[in-house]
Image: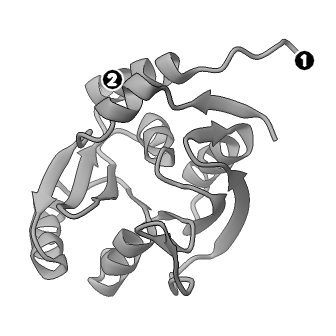
Amino acid sequence: MAIVYSLTPELRIKLKKPIGTLIRGSFAETMRILKNMTEKEKPAFIVSVGDTVSKNLTENHMVPQLSIVDNRAMRRNIQPVPLTAEQTIHVKNPPATITEEALGAIQEALKSNRRVKIVVDGEEDLLALVAVLYSPENAFVIYGQPYEGIVAVKVTPEKKAEIAGILKAMENVRKAK
């Protein structure tokens, strides 16, 4: 399993801050606000990262084209969330890393015209970065912000550049194959 990116202590602190718009409130409030945002913005694509966010989006009729889950919520194992998907991909991605396998699965899922669920053995948190980088412009990447609400990231050229810079700072030195 090749690790492409590893979280540094400096970035761990930086990434505790939302990389998009923080929507505070209860599940019901955050979903209502997000639904209004999607009706106004009409995102090209919706990606959800995290089990609770994926479940809430689906239950509120905002079914993501790509859901990335790890069958955990707040670091505790949970029952797998029933999600609508035409394809399910299983990947390994240890905590505080992004593996080549997870990166490739996200890229393939975003190219496909199918509803895809990626189930991560490990941790899916950092995969929101990859989703932003490779999603089409005007897509929304939605993830949970623990104890605060949800974060909606509108994919723009500027946001892609910001994320590329974060990933560059996380890049592992790999030997040429």
Q: Disc number at residue 162?
A: 2
Q: Disc number at residue 125?
A: none
Residue 113 coordinates in the image, percent (x, y):
57, 60
Comparing 142 with 172, the one in front is 172
Q: Give amino acid for label 2.
A: Glu
Instruction: Count the labels in the image.
Output: 2
Is 109 left, or right, of 1 in this rendering? left
Q: Name which quarter of the figure residue 114 lies in.
A: bottom right
| Residue at 51 percent of width and 46 percent of height | 127
Residue at label 1? Answer: 177
Label 2: how many Cα within 10 Å (few below 14, some 14–19, many 20+): some
Residue 2 coordinates in the image, percent (x, y):
78, 35
Is 10 left, or right, of 16 in this rendering? right
CB atoms at circles 1 and 2 under 8 Å apart?
Answer: no
Label 1: how many Cα within 10 Å (few below 14, some 14–19, many 20+): few
Q: Quadrant of the C terminus?
A: top right
| Residue at 38 percent of width and 56 percent of height | 45
Q: Is residue 106 above or below residue 122?
A: above
Residue 114 in sight here:
yes
Its colouring scheme is one colour
| Residue at 27 percent of width and 54 percent of height | 43
| Residue at 60 percent of width and 39 percent of height | 97
The secondary structure type at the circle numbered 2 is helix
Residue 17 coordinates in the image, percent (x, y):
23, 39
Q: Is residue 15 above or below residue 63?
A: above
First in sequence: mark 1 vs mark 2: 2
Comparing 106 with 73, the one in front is 73
